[in-house]
Amino acid sequence: MARAHNFSAGPAVLPLSVVEQLQEALPEFRDTRLGLMELSHRSAAFGEVIASARERLKRLLAVPEGYEVLFLQGGASLQFYMSALNLTAPGEAADYVLTGSWTKKALKEAARACDAKAIWDGGETGWKRVPRPGEYAPRDEAVYVYYTSNNTIFGTRWAEPPAVGEHHLVCDASSDICWGPMDVARHDVIFAGAQKNLGPSGVTAVILSPWAVERSRTAGQSRPGGLPSMLDYGLMVDKGSMFNTPNTFGVFALERVLAWLEDLGGLAVMAERNREKAALLYDELDRTDFWRPHAERDSRSLMNVTWRCADPELEPVFVKEADAAGLVALKGHRSVGGLRASIYNACPRESVEALVDFMRDFERRHG
Amino acid sequence: MARAHNFSAGPAVLPLSVVEQLQEALPEFRDTRLGLMELSHRSAAFGEVIASARERLKRLLAVPEGYEVLFLQGGASLQFYMSALNLTAPGEAADYVLTGSWTKKALKEAARACDAKAIWDGGETGWKRVPRPGEYAPRDEAVYVYYTSNNTIFGTRWAEPPAVGEHHLVCDASSDICWGPMDVARHDVIFAGAQKNLGPSGVTAVILSPWAVERSRTAGQSRPGGLPSMLDYGLMVDKGSMFNTPNTFGVFALERVLAWLEDLGGLAVMAERNREKAALLYDELDRTDFWRPHAERDSRSLMNVTWRCADPELEPVFVKEADAAGLVALKGHRSVGGLRASIYNACPRESVEALVDFMRDFERRHG
């Protein structure tokens, strides 16, 4: 048995070197004489881990001075509610650009906390692209505009953040955070479940501007009963993400993934690698009518490549034969079908090359 | 370097056999050809893991037919709010028996969601014991009574659940779940952060009676905006704890800890071992005036043993010398000081024996 080429949409492939460091730390972590999962989150050793994770993420993304970095639990799905709850007072407006299933879910949760409204709906164009400038306009009274930088299920992405003038910006970057450099200063909240590009499931990175923290302390606290502690950005900042016990193993794994990113040269290097990997795959999809890529060209994701076969009956055959050939998890999301290759940061170029080779062979045999 | 005797209050010591199984699964999990942290939570392989965790916990605790078992994120601290939010409509009453810091925090969060009130306050007796029958009386209108079965910080426990007549019962069992058999049928909600007796941090086990699930679907949903999805017990039940991506590594680790408990003979065997371990330590504390045990006898915890030195200036010396002798994490909680040995299920008898030997030696040298 050997590790397959892993195209899982998340939890997803990790660098093997990180996996090996986790193995080593499990029974004895550094000089603590305790296992990594078996030491107090209040210990000096874990304090160093979480501080290092924070600093590494700040360096990698060039997070501006004054911004805060948190590591929370609950995934992006909890952030859908928590971001609206902290940034608005009851009845205030927030605008959502719907580019896929996850933005729709975010809107639904936000609407429990404020006057949340969709200002563009990609469902009308089959979720094949993000909007073009001029196709959406935030309400003047909107406290913030919300978008999803990369759409895991449909395989689309924003090449640039939405153009929304002076409006505050909230971004779910779960499926492409750290794919390459990002203009953090343009955002007030960026959050990301770790299980795609940052590490294991069970940790959520949250980046907050000074404005976002201040809103949590004012608008958020104006809610009846105040903000529940575990949903309070300001309190989480005050407590350094340790109001209660964090997912200590997950934070360590994330810290090791960030160290791997820094060691390989940072996000400019990573971006170049990601562009090359994605180009290999999109070139193959564009080469022949045998494949039908889903996303429009200017919205193509670099992380999740989605397509169909011209003959959809070949899709389950493709998934099965690929799996037998050691290329795993290529089935499209259960809500849309088709095929999907998730090629996050830790997916090596060799895996993409192996996939392209397999695709050519598959066409020869079934075309 | 070798693993020390680990008395951490949490995250806490795990069985070495479990740690070794985690090491093995990290790069390749069973026949998946994928690493344990790198496969989809929707995969058949992970589906088996979470189903097994659920079934094992049901078997171990003899959870009654019709009860539900969830594995969520956010720790007990999120359950403080979530339990009140799901079980009450706004303005309804809930009664809290305060036996330590964690119940106080639970009351604070519940008060954001309902008319939560303390009906006994252990602070008035120095947190040395839980109340005696007759010292507390729930309000007739209270929807439920809330208690903490074991108080990690003060080292006290309820030998039996509170006597509250027909009232529904909610229990934070974070620090003693599965210490031994428990009358689950007497409860409507039992929750426990995993990082003391069940596994790593970042997973919370929640057990719900049919009544609790029904309340979530009725009283809980009567709240303005409805229940946020991630805070909705009913929805989590419907989705089998997978509304979103769970902490997959954590759930696997927990499943392995439960397998270890089943393999050693279940909770009656575990209870016997725990009583013996605790007796070793309490006998030493009672043997000499050199030590000053904190908890009153009938409230003594079997999981967290707390004491002081007659001469408090010796306490930091004790912690330091013990650490040098390979006995780690014996400092009392930062809020109360003194000494504490957490001797959860996975703490072997040999560790307690080593501690008692050290204590005798320490008295000889400093007494």
Image: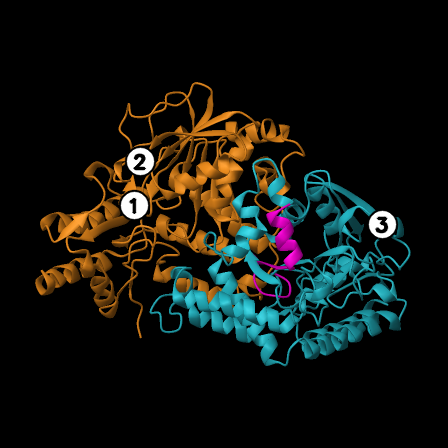
Chain colours: A orange, B cyan
Residue B82 picture location, percent across and down: 63, 47
Residue A110 picture location, percent across and down: 49, 35
Disc marking residue A122? 2
Residue A66 picture location, percent across and down: 50, 31
Whether discs 3 and 1 lie on one chain: the answer is no
Disc marking residue B120? 3
Q: Amino acid at mark 3?
A: Trp
Foreground tag (2 vs 3):
2
Question: Distance between the Cα atoms at labels 3 and 1?
Answer: 55 Å
Q: Is residue A87 left or right of residue B218?
A: left
Comparing A305 with A107, the one in front is A107
Q: Amino acid at mark 2?
A: Gly
Chain assignment, label 1: A
Q: Amino acid at mark 1?
A: Phe
Query: Which residue is labeled 1 in the image?
Result: A154
Whether discs 2 and 3 lie on one chain: the answer is no
